[in-house]
Image (tube, rainbow, N blue to C red):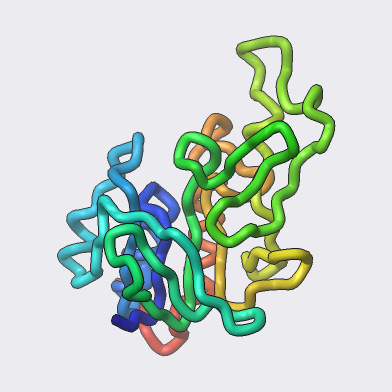
Amino acid sequence: MKFDVIIIGSGQAGMQVAAALQRSGRKTAVIGLGRSINEVEVKPYEQLGGTLLIGDSVTGGIFDGDRLQAVRTANLGAYPLEADDFVIATGKFLGRGLVADMDGIYEPLFGLDVDYDPDRSHWFDADFGACQPFLRFGVRTDAQSRPSVGGRTVTNLYACGELLAGVSAVEGRDAIAGSAARVIGQLKPSDHAEA
């Protein structure tokens, strides 16, 4: 099955991007394990004709050079989902958009480059009530919101939401919404007006 845009993640940022792009005339699909903690409303997106694959997860991607061609999911197995563009909005540690181990912090789906302090003693603040530094770690992007792998930009993959370096839901939802708006601006066709 082929889409214009596949969005990986069904939280605030992913659903914001999906609804705006679907409304603008782009054929979209959202892949997400489940509902967001914030209970993001998905019904309007479905009413716009978007494809919602809740209860599924992306297991990997098929690349051609610096372009992501398709993703595979746990439920569809060997059957890939293709798109012209992809958006990743999988959150940080709770949503498993980032994974930490004794060697570092990783983005597990595509191996995207992550900004974090390699000194583990700088990952936390001893004051439990303080904003913890690890919450600001995340995926590095270029000016067009495109992440990289090994320093090479993935030209048709866009990242937004809490997954990004410097963005933390603890500090407010405005940064998440702003990052989604930037991705919408990159992907929304200029000849369609958002309703």
Residue at position x 26%, y 54% from top? 54
Which residue is pictured at 26% across the width and 51% down the height? Answer: 55
Give the side of residue 105 with respect to residue 169, left or right: right
Farthest right residue in view? 119
**Looking at the picture, does residue 24 appear above or below residue 160?**
below
Q: Quadrant of residue 134?
A: top right
Of residues 18 and 64, which is closer to you in this image? 64
Count of picture labels: 0
**Residue shown at 54% from the left, 30% from the top:** 170
Residues 5 and 16: in front is 5
Q: Position of residue 33 (x, y in %)?
A: 33, 48
Residue at 74% over, 72% down: 152
Q: Position of residue 125 (x, y in %)?
A: 73, 17
Q: Residue furthest front?
A: 78
Task: Give the answer, above or below, for where 190 lies relative to 59.
Answer: below
Quadrant housing residue 124: top right
Point out residue 41 in the picture as x, y percentages from the top left corner. Answer: 25, 48
Taking 81 as reference, is 127 left or right?
right
Q: Is residue 116 left or right of residue 182?
A: right
Quadrant containing the N terminus in the rendered view: bottom left
Q: Is residue 143 left or right of residue 181?
A: right
Image quadrant where one finds the C terminus? bottom left
Q: Is residue 194 visible?
A: no
Q: Position of residue 17 (x, y in %)?
A: 41, 63
Q: Compared with residue 164, is residue 20 higher up or lower down, i.e. above or below? A: below
Please say whether residue 146 is visible from this viewpoint. Answer: yes
Q: Nearer the viewer, residue 119 or 91?
A: 119
